Amino acid sequence: MKTRMIGGAEVSALGIGAMSFSDFYGETCEADSHAVLDRAREVGVTHIDTSNIYGAGRSETVIGTWLAANSGARDTVHIATKAGISSDAHGNRVIDNAPDYMEAQLDASLRRLGTDHVDLFYAHRHQADLPPEEVAGTLGRLVEKGKCRAIGFSEIAPSTLRRAASEHPVGAVQSEYSLQTRAPELGLIQTCAELGTALVAFSPVGRSLLTDSPIPRARIETNPFLSVNPRFTLPNHDFNLAALAPFRALAAQMGLSTAALAIAWGLHKGDHVVSIPGTRSVGHFDELVAGANTDLTPQDMARIEQILPVGWCHGDRYASNQWVGPQNYC
């Protein structure tokens, strides 16, 4: 397994996006999540990336019960979690990076995970009216207290990263990055490389579009997130499936699953890129591992870019109400 560095720690280039341990994309159970974690341990996948809001703490709890059931596992995995997204009295999303709130949320995460520290703690979204230097200082004090080993931010602009890093080293920035979401190439991937910050790529297989088995229309229509997401609403969804047919054919020609080729492409975009796909099945997880272990030539990369050039995807990556928190920078 290829490795990367996050905040001074060596981790597997492929990680686990543990939103899949909740029911966000479909029903799952603890046993299936534990099976994925067992398989990850077998093949050397060490980075697990979760959040306090995934299933209202369920994802962290599932990881915690797996750690408790597997002696020594905590010493072999690199655990990241996030906080900073809350709700007001009306259920509207609120971004809160206040020091007391962030520490209280991390403390709750540690209890669910059953550990005294995490290896990486992100601000899940940046609170716009707080200077990023101030938020980095808040997170840095949690490092000083021993509650986390490194700090990170999710969905921030390159300029915000530079300001935060002027106050405290930033171990990782998490951002959506895949063949269908190329925005990080407009400065973020470059700034991360310059500052020694890992770019942790979530949704690297496009919320299933970049796989051999995209989520079917019937399930999309019953999923609160996907049913309003512009890339999954009609007619964009049909256009996207058609545009991806040549890419699926290329993957098959190369002896790979579509997901494997998508993962391989992402990891070849920089030796500071960490890919964190989510999955509910060991079989799909093995496809992702195969992608992480695949070496692509410059000719392979050029063929992929020819089939899926920048800007091919139909629809924005978020609906208007889903854009609360992420920073735009283009």
Image (spheres, helix red, strand yellow):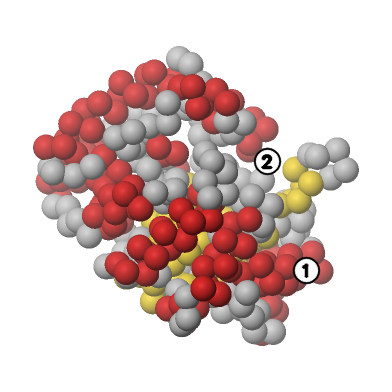
Point out residue 155 in the picture as x, y percentages from the top left corner: 56, 51
Which element type, helix, strand or loop, lies under badge 1? Answer: helix
Q: Residue at x 57, y 61 (%)?
A: 62
What percent of the width, then of the height, locates residue 205?
A: 37, 43
Observer-nearest of 174 and 28: 28
Q: CA distance from mark 2 to mark 1?
A: 23 Å
Lower sequence index among marks 2 and 1 = 1
Q: Which residue is mark 1?
A: 104
Residue 302, percent across and down?
Answer: 18, 42
Dot 1 alpha-carbon crowd within 10 angstroms: few under 14, some 14 to 19, many 20 or more: few
**The image quarter in which residue 319 lies:** top right
Question: In the rendered structure, which amino acid carries the disc numbered 2?
Answer: Val
Residue 117 vs 54, above or below: the answer is below
Question: Is residue 166 or residue 34 the one in the foreground?
Answer: 34
| Residue occupied by mark 2 | 324
Q: Amino acid at mark 1?
A: Ala
Q: Is residue 256 above or below residue 158?
A: above
Residue lying at 30% horizontally and 67% vertically, measured from the top left: 43
Of the 4 image quadrants, the one containing the N terminus is bottom left
Q: Is residue 188 above or below residue 90?
A: below
In the figure, 252 relative to 153: above or below?
above
Q: Is residue 296 left or right of residue 81?
A: left
Q: Position of residue 312 (x, y in %)?
A: 35, 28
Let me know if residue 255 appears in the view.
yes
